[in-house]
Amino acid sequence: MPDIKLYGFAPSSYTWTTRLAAEEKGISHELEPIEFGSDAHKALHPFAKIPIMEHGENRLYETSAICRYIDEAFDGPALQPADPMGRAEMEQWNSAVVDYFYDWCIRRIVVQRIVVPSRGGETDEAMVADAVSHARYTMEVANKRLGQSAFLAGDVPSIADFMLLPVAFYLKQVPEAAQTMADKPALEEWLARMQARPSFGATAPSPPG
């Protein structure tokens, strides 16, 4: 029997983050799809989002909360820095990924470039064009930080790295990568290190759509 159950779908950036955390922690998980917006979905998550985690009688939503629970509820390698400043910096990056990176990189570029056409729609080229400079800036911020340490919150990977990894990986798959991710050596080296980890190979889905 798996240690935890995750509701979501594999290509989702946030679902992928929780699966990375489970793999890094060395625990097993079951991934169960869910019908978006259904009564069953709303019974698990009042805002009908993913992922959702169940562990026995415990249920959580919101990616960062799930990852912190996985880290603190199970034995295994630490997924959070040991010192207060390190943990605060990790949370700073978690919040930044949710508030800035995901919106500009995934919602406005990757979804428009990959997901919308896969569903028979037309890419909103104006939205993509407007997002490029913002996405490039987010990657510049990450590159600057990764030029100072191997990972976002220090010398070992933390939840923050598992939050950013799907965003950077997916952005790398679209033509706009040339405008947003090029000439950022620290970011490129970090991405290569993250993709070399066993957790990446164990969880990497096909690109969304």
Image (cartoon, grey):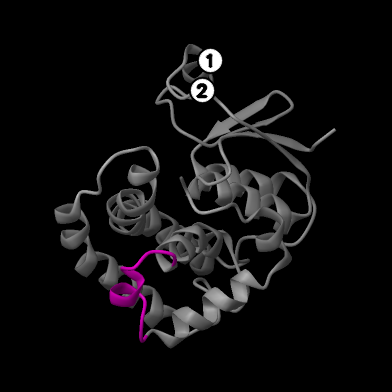
Magenta-tinted stretch: 173-183
- SS for tag 1? helix
Residue drawn 53% across and 15% down?
40
Nearest the eye: 86 or 137:
137
Q: Amino acid at mark 1?
A: Ala
- SS for tag 2? loop
Which residue lies under the disc numbered 2? 35
Using a 10 Å C-alpha cutoff, classify the residue at mark 2 as few (fewer than 14 neighbours), some (14 to 19) or many (20 or more): few
Figure quadrant of residue 120: top left
Please determine whether, in this image, residue 190 is positioned above or below residue 71.
below
Discs 2, 1 touching: Cβ within 8 Å: yes
Using a 10 Å C-alpha cutoff, classify the residue at mark 1 as few (fewer than 14 neighbours), some (14 to 19) or many (20 or more): few
Nearest the eye: 51 or 206:
206
Which residue lies under the disc numbered 1? 40
Residue 31 located left or right of residue 93: right
Does 174 lie within the magenta span?
A: yes
Gap between marks 2 and 1 measured at Cα:
8 Å
Residue drawn 55% across and 81% down?
150
Figure quadrant of residue 109: bottom left
